[in-house]
Amino acid sequence: SSEFANYANTITRANINEGRAFVFDDNTNLSKKRRTQNIEILRKAGYSIHGVEFWVSEADLIARQENRDKRVPAQAIRQQCAAFQAFNIGTEVDSVIVWPFMA
């Protein structure tokens, strides 16, 4: 949601302003467009950028909703999966770690 995105951006900027050596942007940044603002802010502050992609099948994401207090509709999950864009090494991030989910 835009509310969470604003919160995450505020936390990222606060960490930069405090001079932290490591800033973790915990956000669902599935598209390059959604990631660009924080990546640009971090680059200007002198940080290197390392992306982490959690690869989980759509079926596993939907199945996991059965055990959550706050369930996300299956259609919303399908839309998020369709919107996913992998990181671009060199132009967007310095490196990528791919973390496969094993059910």
Image (cartoon, rainbow, N blue to C red):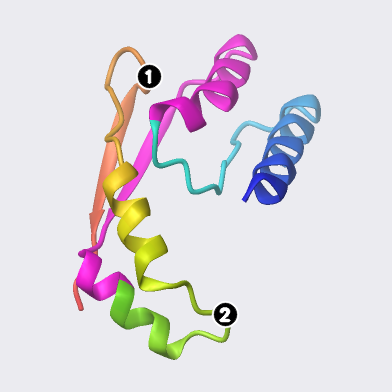
In the rendered view, tell whether residue 68 sits above or below residue 3.
Answer: below
| Residue 5 image offset from top left, x and y in percent | 65, 43
SS state under label 2: loop
- Magenta span covers which residues? 32-61
- Magenta stretch: includes residue 43: yes
> In screen coordinates, is 19 left or right of 46?
right
Q: Look at discs 1 and 2 and give the one toward the viewer.
A: 2
In the rendered view, tell whether residue 10 sits above or below residue 91.
Answer: below
Give the image quarter of residue 83. Answer: top left
| Tally of numbered tags | 2
Quick one: which residue is furthest to the front in this view? 75
Q: Which residue is mark 1?
A: 92
Q: Residue at x 29, y 14 (%)?
A: 90
| Residue 77 image offset from top left, x and y in percent | 36, 63
> In screen coordinates, is 83 left or right of 25?
left
Give the image quarter of residue 84. Answer: top left
Question: Between disc 1 and disc 2, whose residue precedes?
Answer: 2
Quick one: which residue is furthest to the bottom in this view? 67
Q: CA distance from mark 1 to mark 2?
A: 32 Å
- Magenta stretch: includes residue 59: yes
SS state under label 1: loop
Q: Residues within 10 Å of mark 2 (few under 14, many from 20)?
A: few
> In screen coordinates, is 48 left or right of 15?
left
Q: Residue at x 59, y 36 (%)?
A: 22
Q: Residue at x 80, y 30 (%)?
A: 18
- Foreground of the two, 17 or 67: 67
| Residue 64 image offset from top left, x and y in percent | 35, 80
Amino acid type at circle 1 is: Glu
- Residue 70's label in the rendered image is 2
